[in-house]
Amino acid sequence: MVNKVPVLTLDGPSGVGKGTICLMVARELGWHILDSGSLYRLLALSAGSEADLNNVAQLADLARDMQIEYVTSGDALGIYLRGVNVSEAIRTEMTGVLASKVAAIPEVRQALLDKQKAFAQAPGLVADGRDMGTTVFPDAELKIFLTASAEERAKRRYKQLNDKGIDANLSQLTVELKERDERDSTRSASPLLAADDAIVIDTTSLDIEQVLNQVMQLVKQRFG
């Protein structure tokens, strides 16, 4: 099957800069953007607490009914749930932990599959996630997988939190990232892994501009 519109998938673990790169690329190309990781954070936020994660049928219904919109504004991506800007609310550490657990539920992933595919609209889509190239858009024309060491990703997250005035523990962040990587990589439903035809870029020693330059070179080679 051939996609009706060009699709670029950018997969990888938390903290590799996927969101920033996707936003920059989408803005450069004038394409739509899908922050698939936010879908699970949005669902975790909607569910409200870990106790509610046990009701799989209810979670799946909630996933199908979410009204989501992504709005690019300058260097930021606004994420709206039922018309309310929840960009900051979904970025808490607790929401991230719950989102990872939600993402491991096969029924939830299936419920969100069609919703994600619907974001592929002209003139093109930049899709950010963990299984965009393997499960959601397996026929995407260009698949990129970003990676970096857990230690480097924890440092980046630590700096982000400190810049926002939020206290954080670097050692704890490193442990949590490794635990999340383990959950995401070993789950039965769409585990985190690079597609066979994905181009892997290790960002451990690269700054954001260097990563962007590599990605844009690949985009120009593939899409012209």
Image (tube, grey):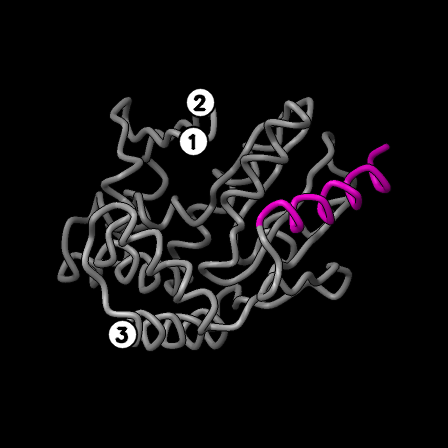
Residue sitting nearer the eye, 1 or 29: 29
The quadrant of the rendering that contains the C terminus is: top right
Where residue 90 appears, as percent x and y from the top left, is 27, 44
User: Is 178 displayed left or right of 138 in the figure?
Assistant: left
| SS category of the residue bearing label 2 | strand
Find out whether the residues at labels 1 and 3 contact each other: C-beta distance under 8 Å.
no
**Cα gap from disc 3 to disc 2, whole angstroms:** 33 Å
Name which residue type carries label 3.
Answer: Gln
User: Is 168 displayed left or right of 24 in the figure?
Assistant: left
Q: Which residue is mark 3?
A: 172
**For the point 57% across and 40% down, which residue is it?**
22
**Cα gap from disc 1 to disc 3, whole angstroms:** 27 Å
User: What is the quadrant of residue 76 in the picture?
Assistant: top left
- Tell me the magenta residue range: 208-224
**For the point 52% across and 38% down, which residue is it?**
34
Q: Which residue is mark 2?
A: 73
**For the point 27% across and 74% down, which residue is it?**
172
Name which residue type carries label 2.
Answer: Ser
